[in-house]
Image: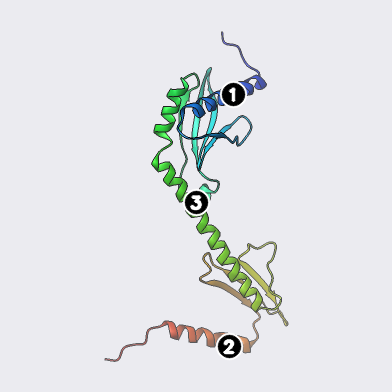
Amino acid sequence: MSEILSWSEEQQLRERIAESCAAGLTEHLPGEWVRCDPYEYLVGLRSGERLLTIRPELKGTIWRVVITADLPEGYRTHTQLEVEETSVAADRPADKIARQVQRRLLTTAYDEAIAEVHAALDAERDRKTILAAAVANLQALIPGAHQSKYDPGDCLRFNGPDLFRGSLRVHYRAAAATIELDCVPIGLAQGLAALIGKHLAAETPAEQEP
């Protein structure tokens, strides 16, 4: 009859299994791999942009090790990618575990996925920079315009005399904005209507003469 481990003993065993697996991978995988443990009882190995996370799991009375080819932080929110993982018996020889990891995880597709995440993160940083510049430009044009702590960073609000107030929300890529106005003085309303009409006339192709 197998011995029942306490929670503390189980966690200690989990950690030993992860560290043993990491040591075997470090020895048998090509390239230089260094420890970079992400969380307690998890062991991480990094080589350049590649990151392996080692997670022992107890299945009944049998220990297995799940090894994940992790992607850069932010991949879930900015790409459609999913991480790949493989599972091995904890007592499998280290060289065979390394061969399985290399065959199933350390692939060209993995490197391409890492590059895709970095490209998406760079694009998102560029988008936020452009958006912030557009919001700052609009804020400079309207005296008293401000960003409310209850609104996202792409929104401005302002108040004027006689209950005149409004808001501007810059769209995702700063190519357009939504403007809401209330109690607009009639003279300003007429001026805005004239600007809108002028814009629509410029955007509408002139009818060709027969």
Q: Dot 2: within a 10 Å radius of its alpha carbon, few (fewer than 14), some, or many (20 or more) residues? A: few
Which quadrant holds the C terminus?
bottom left
Q: Which residue is label 3 attached to?
A: 118
On screen, residue 85 versus residue 148, left or right, reads left
Residues under labels 1 and 3: Cα distance? 32 Å
Q: Where is residue 101 in the image (x, y as percent from the top left)?
A: 44, 31
Residue at image x 61%, y 74%? 137
Residue at image x 53%, y 58%? 124
On screen, residue 208 versus residue 17, left or right, reads left
On screen, residue 179 versus residue 27, left or right, reads right
Mark toward the start of the polypeptide (3 vs 2): 3
Q: Which residue is label 2 attached to?
A: 191
Q: What residue type is labelled 3?
A: His
On screen, residue 184 versus residue 21, left or right, reads right
48 vs 124, nearest the viewer = 48
Residue at image x 55%, y 66%? 130
Mark toward the start of the polypeptide (1 vs 2): 1
Residues under labels 1 and 2: Cα distance? 72 Å
Find numbered disc 2 in the image and state the secondary structure of the residue it sits on: helix
196 vs 75, nearest the viewer = 75
Q: Which residue is label 1 attached to?
A: 14
Residues under labels 3 and 2: Cα distance? 46 Å
